[in-house]
Image (cartoon, helix red, strand yellow):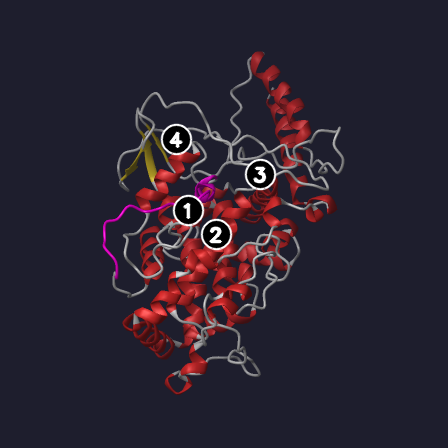
Amino acid sequence: MTTGLGVLLSGFGAGAASAAEPFTDDQLAYDYPSNADYDYVPIMDQFSWLVTDRADIIVLNDSQTVDINNSATPEQVERAIVDQYDDMSVSMADGLGANLGAIYAEARLAGELPKIDALLAKSGGLVGYYSSSNPSKNYFDYDRPYIRFPELLQYRDKEGGDAWDSTSGAYPSGHTSQAYWQGTSLSMMLPELAPQILARTSEAGNNRIVMAAHYPLDVMSGRMMGQHIVERRMSDPAFRELFAEAETELRGVLEAGCGAALADCIAADTPYLSDEDALALYEQRMSYEFPQIAPAGDAVTIPANAESLLITSHPDLTPAQRRQVLELTAIDSGYPLDEGADGSWQRLNLAAAMAAQVEINVDGTISLVEAGAEQPEPTVPGMTEPAATQTPTAEPVETTMPTATAEPSSTVTTSPVPSTEALVPGAKTDESESGALATTGAENAGVGLMAALTLFATGATALILRKRSAGSDG
């Protein structure tokens, strides 16, 4: 019986290993609905009012830039230069931890993560490919620090570098937007490490100030734009399949390199920062040292579909419940850039939301559970979003996020747990339609499941399956 289970498990492993293959040509060429051009100006349009009516905030924006640039340590400068020129989806690897980060970076450089590369690479990564910050820069047309007051700044660059050559607008920061669509994507594939990955992402944004290429407000708006980019991709069920396949690839490579289950690897690793420090640093860089210039305590307006950013960290929750998590973890109102025309991307504390432990109350509402509170035994999470069935066609059909209809019947505590049930990577599509995605072996899962049930029925011990832009923007 043990031998039979071993054979069965090796079959599942073979299916997972196939996910490490590159995306198919059809997957890469498909005209995803979220490929459409989008105007990001409305989510950060408060900047124009700050420039014309709040000179005090602009003065503080300038002075913080000078302070951060002048006070940077040699180590900070070195890291800022690396982020300036390298692919930040690789240079931010230390956000995964000392050991896992090294495994990840080595695998990226060795070409062992082709799906991650296709989604997140600095040059051509699909997540941000259609989302340049240049149109927004041209709209706001605000000069960079090294153009406005170079005499107050320390020049930071590598030998032969061109860090101060760009004359494109400062607001928003394109490098920061890129860092956030890369880092937010990674955090969704590794929600157990979301605070650390997002704190490292915030460092990449802060490094733009170290380089004197941007101001804090540029970095704040770059975060808003970068996370909005990921939301648009995750709200697109067809594109979400690519995320699921890349997650499987990434987690498999990390576990193979570490030689243990991912949870054990994380527990034994040296983290970028502790959870507490990572969350505090991330929140501090959401608003820097700006004062509240509008009333505190106002309700937050959660942007449409922002709940899709919590699909992997809180797979058991409905979209409405995920929106409530975002509400409960948002920072206070009143800071600069708070409310845009499409809601407040500025206030969304994604690191806190992804790390939040929550209770589902009997009426279906959500309550946060304080860290350290006694938790019930975890259960394997399900996924409220069914696998997308959209297939590549010449004319893609706009899709919407499905919502769960089941009402919770009791109070349950959930924690951020990665899920492989969000979508079925490479799920077989309707063969009557043209251009169907190539399968990756997931269609064989049914055979394995039947075998497992048969073994179980004959007295096998329970089988527990562990769940586990194009950018010249600057």
Mark 3 residue type: Pro
Q: Which residue is drawn at the image coordinates 36% and 57% (left, top)? A: 282
What span is in magenta? 293-311
**Residue bearing mark 2:** 228
Percent across and percent down for residue 39 are 52, 56
Q: Do the residues labelled 2 and 1 touch (CB within 8 Å)?
A: yes
Report helix, strand or loop for mark 4.
loop
Q: Which mark is residue 378?
A: 4
Using a 10 Å C-alpha cutoff, classify the residue at mark 2 as few (fewer than 14 neighbours), some (14 to 19) or many (20 or more).
many
- Looking at the image, tell me whether mark 4 or mark 2 is earlier in sequence order: 2
Farthest residue toward the bottom? Answer: 151
N-terminal-most mark, 4 or 3: 3
Q: Which of marks 4 and 2 is in front?
A: 2
98 and 164: which is toward the camera:
164
Q: Distance between the residues labelled 3 and 2?
A: 16 Å
Residue 25 lies in the magenta stretch? no
Discs 4, 3 touching: Cβ within 8 Å: no
Residue shown at the point (54%, 64%) measured from the top left:
135
From mark 4 to mark 3, how far is it between C-alphas? 27 Å
Q: Earlier in the sequence, mark 3 or mark 2?
A: 2
Residue identifier under label 1:
303
Question: Which image quadrant is residue 75 in?
Answer: bottom left
What type is the residue that disc 2 sits on? His
- Say whether disc 1 or disc 4 marks the residue closer to the N-terminus: 1
